Amino acid sequence: MAKKLMKGCEAIGEAAVQAGCRLFFGYPITPQNEIPEYMSGRLPQVGGTFVQAESEVAASNMLYGAAGAGCRCFTSSSSPGISLMAEAMSYIAASELPVVFVNIMRAGPGLGGILPSQADYRQATKGAGHGDYRLLVLAPSTVQEAADLTMEAFDLADKYRSPVMILGDGLIGQMMEPVEFKRHIEPEDLPVKPWATTGAHNRPPNIINSLYLNPEDLEKHNWNLYKKYEAMASEVRHETYLADEKLDVLIVAYGTVARIARTSIDALREKGLKVGLFRPITLYPYPAEALSRTVALADKVLVTELNTGQMLDDVRAVVAGRKPVEFFGRVGGMIMSAEELAENIERVAAVPA
Amino acid sequence: MYSEIILAGFGGQGVLLIGKLLAYAGMKGGLEVTWMPAYGPEMRGGTCNCTVVLSDRQVGSPISRSPHGAIVLNLQSIDKFESTIRPGGIMVVNTSLINRPAVRDDLIVVPVAANQIALEAGSAKATNMVALGAFLGASRLVDLALVKATLAETFAGRPKVVQLNHVCLDKGFEIGQAIAAAVPAGR
């Protein structure tokens, strides 16, 4: 398929279709409305169904049902909407169902604003809903990567029978870049899900449930989930930019901020400052071992995010006091320019180690 | 090659469309491109802008604090963006709606009466195409033929629209080209 110029939101929607997903349940919220808009036009063309639910609570429970019936399904929302879906997310994780959630983050807390943000890092990676569960979280940095990771998210959700989240921000949702869809999957070609509630003809009934009143059973269930999350560690991935040599400053950033950092790094390299980038692509599982190796090459580490310092905690845990870890963030929908980030990198570099 | 361009005007002038045309044509020309609209709580008739980045390698920041060039279609836009353009950059100014001269003397300013030219060519709706043509004539960032081909695809089945827009692109291009040719060498 030839490259097309697409908005991040539309690319995510088309990627879901190409991944064989035929069901979308959602409720509108800026800045991701282009996803449900796209799905409402596209899904009927391929025999799928788009449902605008009465609320995010309803949409997320429709996903619970559709995933239980063995169908690839997804939703997209933005920060306050994801909070409303958190209860169902916990039930979906507990019932071991594959669902893809897309969060195009906006500034919070509360209703906050509609402009880009990364303020839901902690919510996504440490647990939005209650209980001892995990979400596999993927953070795209380009529109192409948003499309690729959305397709993979469906495979990963099926592989681990677990909810998976695409964590983007308003910038990646709204920007247009060239994109091509590298794979095409028809729903009929997807592997059969023997656990799904597809009608118990000539087989014992399948039961999807998250209630375990017997504590021995529930403990066993929790440890089984834990083993699954341990196995997910093999999915860890990251990217580096100019970070395989001795560095004055190592930038750690994800998503859109990581690409702003690339521009800052290019400008500072021209001035002779040795700066590199470490970009986690999976935010859970976190690429801790790779980051630890890269940190060893750097004098200092600068974490930069569109929040007040959330991934900062994970980076500090990896660095474990070996190097100074500084932070620069913009919040409330404000976005750092490449120049502003470069000024902050220079500031950090100038401080005696 | 790396260039950040801001295209600004008020809602309805088609700045988002010419931004997309520029990005699409850049992509066809083998460049890496990003188109980023400034989004927010906007109202009808309010200001509107987008940033296009054209590069021969992966695009980093999709937003720009100091663009290499700008197209400004109304007074609010020149007031907002003139001071941000990098020295030596191109600024296309729609003199049909902007009744003040440029303040900066370190820019290549391309004044073009885009509304009048478009109206004379057939419709003021093509104002944006005159401005884009002028920018391409002065900057030569993207091949005019690629922009025209992209436009023809965008408005496939509407030959009159395509023809009018092509004429406006050409008229703007000539003005931009003449101004760039008059810029002393070394600028």
Image: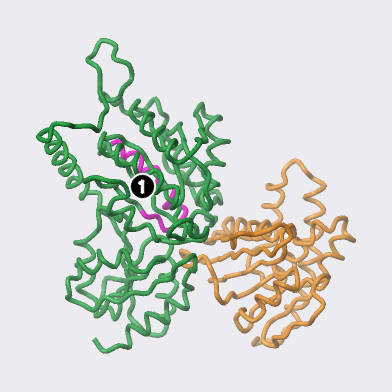
Chain colours: A green, B orange
The location of residue A70, given as percent across then percent down, is: 34, 27
| Prevailing secondary structure class for the magenta stretch in the rendered image | helix
For the residue labelled by badge 1, is the local secondary structure a helix, a strand or a loop?
strand
Membership of B116 in magenta stretch: no
Please tell me in which quadrant of the rendered image residue A344 appears. Answer: bottom left
Task: Give the amino acid at mark 1.
Answer: Met
Q: Where is residue B183 in the image (x, y as percent from the top left)?
A: 72, 84
Furthest-top residue in this view: A202
Q: From what the image shows, is residue A327 above or below residue B51?
A: below
Residue in the picture at 27% in, 71% down: A244
User: At 30% from the left edge and 64% from the top edge, which residue is drawn?
Assistant: A311
Left/right of residue A134 with respect to residue B74 in the rendered view: left
The residue where tag 1 is placed is A165
The x, y position of residue A163, in whole percent, is: 32, 41
Q: Nearer the viewer, residue A149 or A137?
A: A137
Magenta segment: A139-158
Residue A295 in the image, given as x and y percentages of width and height = 23, 71
- Judge from the rendering whether residue A104 lies leftward or rightward of residue B119; answer left or right: left
Residue in the foreground of this view, choosing between A299 and B131:
A299
Instruction: Tell which subunit mark 1 falls on.
Output: A
